[in-house]
Image: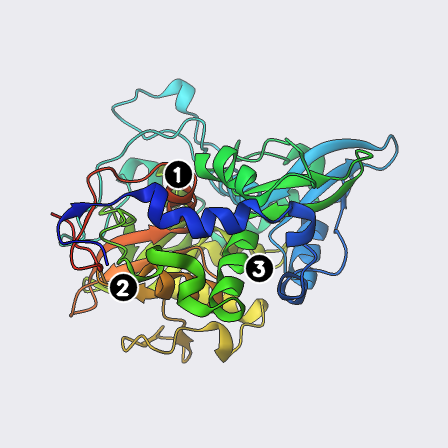
Amino acid sequence: MISPSKPLDFVSITKPVTDALAAETIASATRNSVSRQLRPNALVILDGYSSIDHAMQTFRKNQIHCAPVRDNSTGEWLGLLDHSDILVFALKMATEGYDPEHTSPDSHPPPPTFAAAAAMPKHDPKGPEEELPLKWRDFVAKSADELGHRAVRFAIRMVRNVVNESQKNEFCPVNDSGTVFQVVEDVFARGVHRVPVVDESGKLTDIFSQSDVLRMLYDILHHRNGMQGLGPIAQCNIESLGLISPTVIAMSSKAQAIHGFWLMMFHKVTGIAILERGVLVGNLSASDVLHLSTHNLTSLLDPITAFVTESDNSWHCDSDHKDTSNKHVHFNGFGSILRPPVTVTPRTTFGTLIEKLAVHHVHRAYVVDDEGRPTGVVTLTRVMEMLGGYPNVSASVSSGQGQTK
């Protein structure tokens, strides 16, 4: 047992986990039984000349969020396309006419792209939900008819023109003979979510993501000696490990979905909290954009809760993917139950966090108080940062469980 108030030795407490990740190659990690149950049977490849509408249908059909893009006429790899790229492009189409080059920085926020995003005031979890600047809203297509016309151009745009639209998906293949820990340390710990994988001949064979690492950790929990398989870190609470970010980006459940997505891109996050009178009732994810098509782009003007519910239905989510432990079940006003977000507390252990993220297939868990109000958020990327050697150096542990000083 670690003595009270002793600073955490991250090298020691993470060693069983990092050793396990270092002992497994990317090739074996993507082919084990647990991974194969949750991943597509074959690599899905998009033709660069196919449409965005086709790409989104392919994503939904195969239950994936990313695919490599190739020019089938030349065999050249063009890059990766994921839901963040589609989201940024959809926002550009929906806000067509907003030109930051001809407006002063004081009068308008930047356009909805990662490259031009600037820091807005951080959200205070105890304060009101964040609102968008009113002047920017003037550029949003409020008319469903107008947005419907734009939907056609959105849907027929060629995939090759939207690849890496988010500027977060550079095409940097890794060799499948490398270890999982090498990817965590060199790539995922720096904020990258997924990488293409090539074999010894240089053939692209797979996509490896942070979710694959999560599945490995979950496999260790349930098939390799349980909590002991993860070592001492399994019993450390997430607060002591410095995994909690106190900044919660949130919007009211009554806000339009397009406002929530724009706020998401503005803050460079992939999910925002949905609040009802300050209480956490849901989560809007960047992947929710994948249920859009030529026929329903106007749903961006719907309330966030209605949009999320429709997204869940289009992805055929069942009860096994919902966090039924959350007591704050919320009806969206349209007769359907809004899927509760995954929640934790500062005292939740690392082992329990990994289990929650893996079972519910999510990349973030919200830290809530006794009233269900969000006080922080834990992301899978933050877990990768810690395992890759970027811990919160101020963290400490008490009685083997840990609490922040």
Q: Quadrant of the N terminus?
A: bottom left
Query: Which corner quadrant of the image does residue 386 belong to?
Result: top left
Residue that mark 3 sits on: 291
- Name the front one of labels 1 and 2: 2
Figure check: 311 above or below 292: below
Task: Assign a secondary structure to mark 1.
Answer: loop
In the image, what residue occupies the spot 31% across and 40% down? Answer: 391
Figure check: 371 above or below 386: below
In the image, what residue occupies the spot 69% across and 61% down? Answer: 62
Q: Say whether residue 264 is left or right of residue 88.
A: left
Residue 210 visible in image? no
Label 3, label 1: how far apart the Cα atoms are: 21 Å
- Name the front one of labels 3 and 1: 1
- Residue 268, numbered circle: 1
In the image, what residue occupies the spot 38% across and 78% down? Answer: 324
Of 225 and 372, the residue lying toward us: 225
Of 389 and 293, the residue lying toward us: 389
| Cβ atoms under marks 3 and 1 closer than 8 Å | no
